[in-house]
Amino acid sequence: MAIKCLKCGFVNEDNVNFCINCGNNLIDNPNSNAPEDNLEWFAQKIYEGKVNLPTRDCPIILKRNEKPIVVLPNITFKEPRAVRTSIGGYTGPTIRITKGISFKLGGASSRSISHDEIKAIDKGTLTITNKRLIFTGSMKTLNYNLSKILSINEFKDGISIQRDNKQKTEYFTGSDEILLNYKRNNQLNTTPFYGFLLKAVLMSQIE
């Protein structure tokens, strides 16, 4: 199905995202009702700051000229943690005395190896403002400026963040258990708050 650009009126093929005549973003056109197209459209609207996201019960004291963008409860904070595993066994030769009877020379030895596993650290509220990311849990609190973020990876249930002066990657999961309502083509739609939508929120505020 051809898509008519709402800006210049040019009729484009249905396999393009931008108008080949004026460059207008065609995902803003209300011509598709496919779920994946709706989510792409919704993510774009979030990035443009045109979506009212939940900010009730903001748990932090806002600074001057700071405003909450989204407040998400029941978010799990995770980090890689070193886990040590012992590997052991007998060393030395085995001597056979007679049929069915033998004994081992030497003794038992073991060694410990370490590897990282992603562990749930705490559960709490994730607040994103126009300036900061704040996680407030029962045991753990995080608070840093969005300008410190180096990269964001999205998952179905949340995101991971790498930031300046922080060696370990930080994971925030459970966002997909929160439902968002939005309207398109005068139709009310509902979607889980997938990780790529949460990433769009952060990207919209990082300068």
Image (cartoon, rainbow, N blue to C red):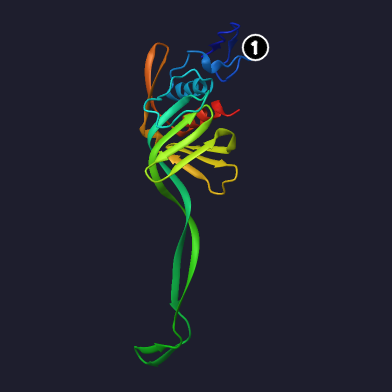
| Residue drawn at the location 65% of the way across and 11% of the way down | 22
- Classify residue 75 as left or right of residue 43: left
Residue that protrudes farthest toward the bottom in the picture:
97
Where does the C terminus fall, quadrant-wise?
top right
The amino acid beneath tag 1 is Cys
For disc 1, the marked residue is 22
Horizontal and vertical percent position of residue 150? 60, 38
The residue sitting at the right extreme is 21
Q: Is 158 rendered above or below residue 182? A: below
Residue 98 spot, x, y in % from top left: 37, 93
Q: Position of residue 62 (x, y in %)?
A: 47, 28
Percent across and percent down for residue 36 are 46, 25
**Foreground of the two, 76 or 128:** 128
Badge 1 density bin: few <14, some 14–19, many ≥20, Cα 10 Å: few
Q: Is residue 21 left or right of residue 79?
A: right
Residue at the spot x=44%, y=27% of the render? 70
Q: Which residue in the rendered view is the most extreme toward the top? A: 9
Residue at 43% x, 18% y is: 33
Q: Secondary structure at mark 1?
A: loop
Residue projecting furthest to the left: 100
Count of labels in the image: 1
Q: Is 82 situated left or right of 187 in this image? A: right
Figure check: 76 above or below 87? above
Identify the residue shown where x is 40% and y is 34%. 175
